[in-house]
Structures are given as C-alpha cells and as structure tokens.
Image: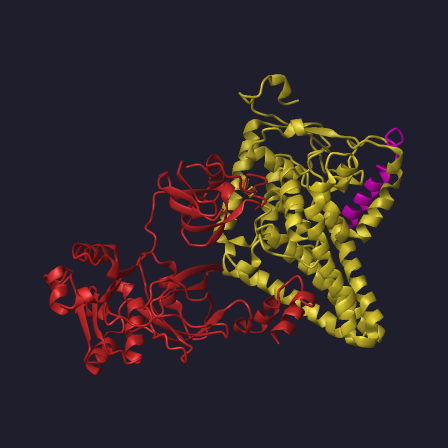
Chain colours: A yellow, B red
Amino acid sequence: MAILTETTEGPLVLSVEQVEEIGRELDALRARITEDLGAGDREYIYNVIRAQRGFEIAGRGLLYLGFLPPFWLAGVAALSISKILDNMEIGHNVMHGQWDWMREPTLNSRVFEWDTVCPGDQWRHSHNYMHHTYTNILDMDRDIGYGILRVDEAQSWNVLRLGNPLYAFILMVAFEWGVMGHDLEVENIVRGKKSWSEIKTLVKGQMRKAGRQVLKDYVVFPALTGPLFLSTLTANFTANIVRNLWTFSIIFCGHFPTGVQTFTQEECAEETQGEWYVRQMLGSANIKGSKLFHIMSGNLSHQIEHHLFPDLPANRYPEIAPEVKALCEKHGLPYNTGRFAKQIGSVWGKLFKLALPPFLVKNSQQAGVIVMRRVQPTTASPKEVGV
Amino acid sequence: MVGLLDLVSKTMTTPHPLDRYLELVRPTLTRRSMRAEITHVRRSAVGSVTLTLKPGRQWSGHIAGQYIQIGVVIDGVRHTRCYSPVNADTRRDRHIELTIKAHPHGLVSNHLHENAIPGMVVDLEPAAGVFHLPQPRPERIVLISGGSGITPVLSMLRTLANEGYRGEILFLHYNRSPEYVPHRQELEAIAMQHGNVRVEFRYPETQRHANFGYDELEALAPWFPSAQTYLCGPPGLMAAVRTVYEAEQLGDRLHSEEFTLATAVVNPEDAEGKLTFSGSGVVAENSGETLLEQAESAGLSPEYGCRMGICFTCTAVKRSGCTRNLRTGELDSDPDQPIQLCISAPVGDVDIAI
Ligand code: FES
C-alpha cells in the first residue's frame, strides 16, 4: 500500500514491523477501554438523552408563544439543539453499536431510529458497513463525493464539475435528504449499474420514515399550535435546516480537509489489521474545540479516533485522542487536526478548486508515506507489492 | 385512551416510542416496556434473598410453577435471568415474590443478594413456562424439590393451600441444612394448618439414608402412583426421581422443570458442542470457527457486511449457550443476547436464532 500524504521532509517509509506495532498498540488501547466501560458511561449517554428530550419538549413548548419573535427564536434554537444531539451524539453513535455492550434493548444498534428522514437500517448499510469498512478507497467508499461531488483529484473532471461548490451547497442545505438517498446509489442507476427493481424496498422504507418525519414537523405540531400553524411550521423547518448545516459541516470536516488521503483498491487488497488502522488514520481529520463542541458534533470532531474504533462509546474519544496522536508522532505519521474555521475553510477551498479543470490548478505538492507490505504468498508477484 | 396514546407515539414522539419519554419521568410509568419496583427485601435463609416486586399495570399474573424473566443493571450492563415466583398465583394480589439463591458464579443472584434495596427497578417479562398445575386440580399431588428448585413448587403449594385444596399433598424438599431452606417456617405452618398437607425436609449431607429412593417415597406417600408429581431440582435429584417413576411405569405422571445452575466455567479453547440455528432448524457440530463462518458452512446465508466486527450487520440473537468474543476474549453466557456473528465463536452448545 502506497500512501501519499503531505509531509515536509519527503517520503516516509513505514516498515512492515512498524505497521504491525501500530496495530498491536491500537488493539491494546481498544482492549483497555472496552475493559473499563461501566456505570459511568451509562450515566453519560442517559444524561445526553435526558438533555435532548428536555430541549425537544422545551422547543415544542416555546413555539406556543411563537408569535413573539424571541420565543420563536428560542424555540428554533432548542429544537435545533435537540435534533443535533439526537442525530449526532445519540443516533449516529448508538447505531454504530457503541452502546450495544449495555444490552439495553432500547439502545441497541439493530433497532434504533433517529430523528431524520433516513431510515436507520439503510444508513447502517451505507455508513457503518460501506463507509467504515472501505474508508477512503476510491470507487468503494461512496462517501467520497456522495456520487455527486468532486472531493479528490483522482476523481475525473468534466464540465459538469464546474458546479461542484453549488452542488455541495445544495447538499448541505438538504443534507438529511441527501443522507436518505445515499443508499439508493442513484448515479449507479443512471449509469445502468443498478436496476430500479433493486431499490424498490429502499424507496418504500424511505417513504415510510420520511412520511412520519414530515407529518410530525410540518403537520401535527403546527396544527397543535392552532392559529400559529405557519409560525410553528417555519420554526420546525428552520430547525431542520440548522441541523443540516451543522451535520454537513462536521461530517465534511472529518474526511475532506487538505492532507486527508484516498487509496486505490489495489493498495488495500488483503489488508492486515495494522494496515487497516493506518488507512483509517490517514483518511480522517479531527476538529479542535471545547467539550461542548465535541458533544454537539457527536464527537465526530474526533473523527480519527472514531474511524479507528467506530464501536467504542464516543465519550471515550477525547480521552484516547492524546494517545493516538502520540502514536502518530512516534511513527512520523500526520495527525490531521485544526480549529473548525481552518478545517471547514479547507473543505470549501477544495470544493472550489476541484470544480476547475486539472490543467488550471496546480497539483497539490505531495510527499509520500510508503507503507511496506509483506509479500502475500498467495497473491502472485512481488512487483505488485509496495511501491 | 390506548388509541390516543398510540397516535401520540406514531406522530408526536416519532421516531422514538412514547415510553422513551415516559421512563425519564419515572421508570415504571412506561406503557409497553414492563417494569417492576422492588418494595421489600428480606434475607431470611442463609445464602438467599427474598424480593417483593410491584409490577406495572401490564402485569397479568403468573400460574403457579411458571417463571418470569427480570433484567437488572450491573456496572452499566443489563443482565437478564429467569426466576419462578414463590407466591401463590391468586390474581387479586398483584405482587410478585422471588426467592433468589446466591450462586458462587451467579453474577445476578449475587448482585441481588448483596445490593437489592427497596426502590430498585427491574425489567420484567410476562410469566411463561408449561411447568404448572392443571385445572381442574389432580386429586393427589406430590411436590419434590432440591435447593433453589423449591421456588416453582412452593408457589404451587401456596396456591393450593390458598384455594382450600382438599386432596392429599406431599411436599418433599432436599437441601444442605435447615438454615438453607427458604420459607421453612411458613412451610411448617402450612403443614400445621392443613391436615392434608405433609411437609418433609431431607438433608443428605448430614443425615444418613436421606437420599431420594423408592422406599422413602413409599413411606411418605403410599398413594403416589395415583398422584401427579411435580419435580424441580439439581440433576442428581432429577435423575433419581425419574428412575423410580420410570421403573414404576409412572413416567407420564411425572412433570419436571429443568433446573439450570449458573453456567459452569468453560475452557474457551475447546471446540465442542452442538450449534443450533433455531430459526432455520439446522444443527451442526462446533468447528471452532466464527459463528458467521459456521452458519455459512451449514448452508445458511446470514446477513453480513465488514466481517471484522465494525458494522454490526451480522448481529443476531443468541438464544442460549456461551459464546466468546474473539476481539475481547470475553465470554457471554446470558440467554437471548444480540451478538455479532462475525467475531463470536461458540463455546459448547449454542443456539442462534437465524
Ligand atoms: S459483519 Fe460487520 S460486524 Fe459482523
């Protein structure tokens, strides 16, 4: 596996032994945290749930006074917070199986549903399985551009790419609907790689889930406020949009700032656990911030830790982050992190830059991280191995 | 009312069920999830604790001899176990009384023995099981139990005493010594008040000739061939009673409940036992591989994704048996647990619901 990443001192070579050591150390870290999970972690997730439910009820209540602008605004804020907590620190993480160890039937990854239009089971396929297994592998991980964006130089350019930033903006505003459509792989249908009949059940599930969400936010709650119908409807709509802007921004900061790498399928064939870990670290990026910021981002501000251990409870990521960082430093690997403004700025910069034809923009200066691979006795010639 | 609440759940609280809001107010306020509050805790006999539970509105009672499943949180993890209520099954009295013996390796029983206090809330499932008294009652009844196998038959005896049953009853119980017998005084009181009830205790560890045998049974209840017999206890006692009844060709009059001790500690390296995929009726010999691989070699095609433990696509319910998590090495012998097939291997007999 040849991994290209930006280092100032030229190519970095990771030996087979180094990769194995990284794997062992991360395995040990994981085992230590797993062993330590207990009543305190349980407290934590239930506190977050209590807070989310509190904000939700407060938000719905405030909108009965929605004819007064401060109350309307406060209602929108409370509902936005509720939806963000529900989607990020609760929904995303519960559906990753992070809380399955509690054996709480209601917080089990198989059955959990979240407050967004995408049905949980479809997201578990497109995200937990496709994205987390094949992170940043071109043509495998559909999160690279979601089938509509150019976020990597290896993706080909054509004239339609000129709309890249616009597409990204639309995706951001309508993010929950984008996430819902993700598992349909619409562009594969257009290209004839997937048939309409294959997606029938997916569409049915989406209509059921989205229907309920729409009914709740745009019919039932507005109607319950009687004459304030429109005021409540716009408030709910705004809260949904605020949540979309936020989740899009946090998620895009996790994989698309400068310095994050993508990989080819050949590079990742027959990967060892250590190589898998290295790919996760090089393919993700963190965001620095306060404790509150981390909670509101579902701890996806610790995207690197999340990608190494997607099923460890997210409240533990802050605690292991310094160790992961130290491990990276020890082996000279980059640990991509920065404040929110820097990371999101870099994401949008890339979205604009990659809209342009390659001959107009300089290829970003890249030095290599070369991961030496052990010769696989079953898979043919040593020429294919390493670069 | 119910219709209205369902409507609320489908429209206002979606995607979360209404219960997930109600339980934050009070854990027992839930409509669908049934819970019970512990109201009294008594540690009467050595090594056992007796709990009185006040179940939620949904509780529809038990039939004497049946068991219930409760869920208890220990160090952040919810564990479920089955126990037979020991109280009479009279419907008017809505409480449930459980007598739980602390087993040396019993996580839940030890926890309850040491930590149960009034006010604690446990999960509760409806009563289940076919080991119970028939209606109409048989004319004569023999109840035999050993150790904590006493619980279902104690419920039977109390039920019969409550309803003024006139037939003959022999209640024969085996234990280590008198201090270990839960509800001993009460049993003796029932025998005093009801001329038709004979209560006998045997302590084979300290008494000579106290083991179960034909002569013993014949001496205590010469009418036993015409009775219905209900039996619950450790394997040795079960086997001894069965031998006698089969020799007398009374096998169809003997009703028994398997009595499961806390799962014995097993050697995880042993690839032994039978794998049962109860959803599809397939049985295979344990080969030591992951459950996902074994299911596939048995011709099944369970859902999977990453095959490395990260996506949770392969999660399925383990009905019974012990499995080992290959990533953490952790053993899990709790029944009815969702587990990841791709990183779990069976240890001994295991039943998976796929
Ligand atoms: S197949 Fe992904 S966790 Fe088992």
Coordinates of residue B157 in the picture (x, y in percent)? 28, 73
Q: Is residue B104 above or below residue A219?
A: above
Return the x and y of residue B96 as percentages of the image width and height: 39, 73
Q: Quadrant of the N terminus of chain B?
A: bottom right
Residue A253 appears in view: no
Instruction: Left or right? Give the position of B31 relative to A166.
Output: left
Horizontally, residue A342 falls left or right of residue A292, namely right
Q: Position of residue A302 (x, y in %)?
A: 66, 49
Image quadrant of ligand 1 equals top right
Displayed quadrant of residue A26: top right
Q: Point out the residue furthest to the bottom here.
A: B193
Q: Quadrant of residue A150?
A: top right
Q: Where in the figure is residue B260, as x and y percent of width and height?
A: 32, 56
Region in magenta: A337-361
- In magenta stretch: residue A339: yes
Residue B55 visible from this viewpoint: yes
Residue at figure coordinates x 73%, y 45% from the top left = A182
**Residue A110, above or below B23:** above
**Residue A114 falls in which quadrant of the image?**
bottom right
Q: How many marks?
A: 0
Specify whether residue A68 is painted magenta: no
A350 relative position to B73: left or right: right
Q: Residue at x 41, y 37 (%)?
A: B288
Please report the residue visible at 50 percent of the width from the left and 61 percent of the height from the top: A39
